[in-house]
Image (tube, helix red, strand yellow):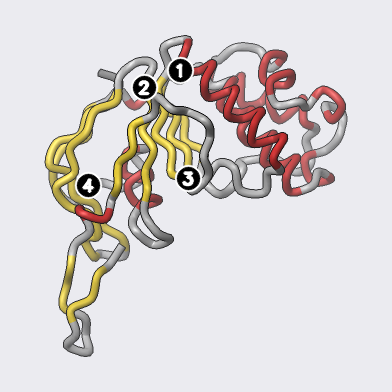
């Protein structure tokens, strides 16, 4: 397995929001996290990425296995598209950026500075960064935000190819990426309940 969790609990702002999670993701597999806004998807992904410790339980994976794509695109605005991808390829020691440029339809933008791109173009560039990491596990937090229908299809094809090559993905998304083989993890049964300050029992996510 590339990723395995056991009896995992995670917290946001000091409050445990998800508890008792146990799942595994192997080579060629995708897991889609489902739940309403605020249900703990981002908190779980940040914990899996090693950006915050779990409250309880275990996350078993190699830290060198993970590439995390959050809401921020991780771009340097003064660098061109090509320079951004070359920078990340050098940081991760991954493959050269030519395949990433083609896969996310960035060839016509390679000389443009990232700060001059539209929101959708920045998103495609940020997602292209995944391809130059060489990491097998992609943790994706609402990756299709700002993408039009055509760009969503491009990205879905990128994910399918990643899985075909033995990679894995955990994806928080409300969009159907056309991955019928992906398993769905509904987070609602794992949400905790705490006593709010006003005395009412309130669900936190």
Which of the two residues, 59 or 175, is positioned nearer the viewer here? 175
Q: Which mark is residue 144?
A: none
Q: On the image, numbered disc 2 is attached to which residue? A: 29
- The mark nearer the N terminus, 2 or 3, is 2
Query: In the picture, which quadrant includes the N terminus?
Result: top left
Q: Viewer-nearest of labels 1 and 4?
A: 1
Q: Which mark is residue 163?
A: 1
Q: Viewer-nearest of labels 3 and 4?
A: 3
Crowd rating for badge 2 (residues with CA inside 10 Å; few <14, some 14–19, many 20+): many
Which of the two residues, 99 or 165, is positioned nearer the viewer here? 165
Q: In the rendered view, would you say 44 is above or below 97? A: below
Q: Residue at x 77, y 40 (%)?
A: 114
Q: CA distance from mark 2 to mark 1?
A: 6 Å
Name the element at disc 3.
Answer: loop
Query: In the picture, which quadrant includes the C terminus?
Result: bottom left
Q: Which mark is residue 173?
A: 3
Name the element at disc 4.
Answer: loop
Q: On the image, numbered disc 4 is attached to which residue? A: 54
């Amino acid at each position: 397995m590339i990723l395995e969790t056991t009896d995992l609990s995670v917290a946001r702002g000091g409050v445990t929001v998800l508890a008792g999670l146990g799942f595994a993701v192997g080579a060629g597999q995708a897991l889609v996290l489902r739940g309403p806004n605020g249900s703990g998807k981002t908190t779980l992904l940040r914990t899996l990425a090693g950006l915050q410790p779990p409250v309880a339980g275990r996350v078993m994976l190699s830290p060198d296995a993970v590439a995390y794509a959050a809401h921020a695109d991780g771009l340097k605005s003064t660098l061109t598209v090509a320079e951004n991808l070359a920078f990340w390829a050098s940081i991760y020691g991954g493959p050269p950026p030519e395949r990433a440029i083609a896969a996310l339809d960035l060839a016509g933008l390679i000389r443009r500075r990232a700060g001059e791109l539209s929101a959708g173009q920045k998103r495609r560039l940020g997602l292209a960064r995944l391809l130059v990491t060489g990491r097998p596990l992609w943790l994706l937090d609402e990756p299709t935000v700002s993408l039009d229908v055509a760009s969503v299809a491009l990205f879905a094809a990128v994910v399918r190819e990643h899985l075909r090559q033995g990679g894995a993905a955990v994806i928080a998304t409300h969009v159907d990426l056309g991955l019928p083989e992906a398993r769905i993890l509904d987070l609602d049964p794992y949400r905790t309940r705490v006593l709010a300050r006003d005395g009412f029992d309130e669900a936190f996510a």
